[in-house]
Amino acid sequence: MRVAVVGKGGSGKTTTSAIVARTMARHGATVVALDCDSNPNLGLSLGVGDFETERLESMRESLDEGGEEHAPGWDDLIARFGSDAPDGVRLAVVSRIDNPSPG
Ligand SMILES: Nc1ncnc2c1ncn2[C@@H]1O[C@H](COP(=O)(O)OP(=O)(O)OP(=O)(O)O)[C@@H](O)[C@H]1O
Ligand SMILES: [Mg+2]
């Protein structure tokens, strides 16, 4: 299942995303949370802390500035750009997806 959370600024997207992600993980689902926000602070709501939230954001900045290669596939993306959050959620701050393959 894939869930996308969108909405107006300040409407509760980040808070809702974190609660849904952690609740599903606590119930046994494998959960990967992808933060696509221009101001990515899902890490704070998920509970990875300030330092890790900023580290993930700076990795995306490095990607966008060409300092790092985009991940060629899902497994690589999660391994290289992901971070373990409480309740077993895996979080990644992601950039534009180039050439998405089916699935
Ligand atoms: N269900 C709720 N009830 C009351 N307050 C809430 C609820 N959900 C979120 N909030 C509060 O509303 C504010 C905005 O929430 P949040 O940051 O999740 O919104 P957002 O849509 O992600 O904002 P942004 O557009 O800035 O990314 C926060 O202070 C949050 O604590
Ligand atoms: Mg938000």
Image (tube, grey):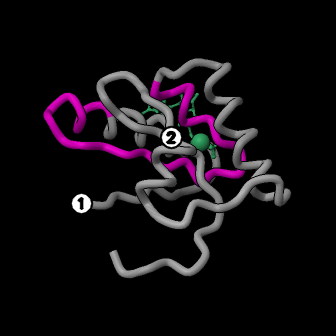
> Ligand 2, what quadrant?
top right
Residue 39 belongs to magenta span = yes
Helix, strand or loop for disc 2 = strand
Residue 1, numbered label: 1
Distance of mark 2 from mark 1, alpha carbons? 19 Å
Q: In this orientation, which residue lies closer to the viewer: 96 or 70?
A: 70
Numbered circles on residues, count: 2
Q: Quadrant of residue 16?
A: top left
Residue ID at (82%, 53%) = 67
Q: Quadrant of the C terminus?
A: bottom left
Q: Quadrant of residue 24?
A: top left
Residue ID at (57%, 44%) = 81
Q: Dot 2: within a 10 Å radius of its alpha carbon, few (fewer than 14), some, or many (20 or more) residues?
A: many
Instruction: Return the x and y of residue 10 as percentages of the image width and height.
Output: 61, 42
Residue 80 located left or right of residue 91: right
Q: In this orientation, which residue lies closer to the viewer: 46 or 79?
A: 79
Residue range corresponding to the magenta coloring = 22-46
Q: In this orientation, which residue lies closer to the viewer: 15 or 79?
A: 79
Residue 82, numbered label: 2
Above or below, comparing residue 51 to residue 34 in the picture: above
Q: Dot 1: within a 10 Å radius of its alpha carbon, few (fewer than 14), some, or many (20 or more) residues?
A: few
Residue 30, numbered label: none
The earlier-in-sequence mark between 2 and 1 is 1
Dots 2, 1 in contact, CB < 8 A: no
Instruction: Return the x and y of residue 25 as percentages of the image width and height.
Output: 24, 34
Label 2 beta carbon less than 8 Å to ligand 2: no
Residue ID at (14%, 33%) = 27
Instruction: Return the x and y of residue 77 as percentages of the image width and height.
Output: 51, 53
Residue 37 belongs to magenta span = yes
Above or below, comparing residue 86 to residue 7 in the picture: above
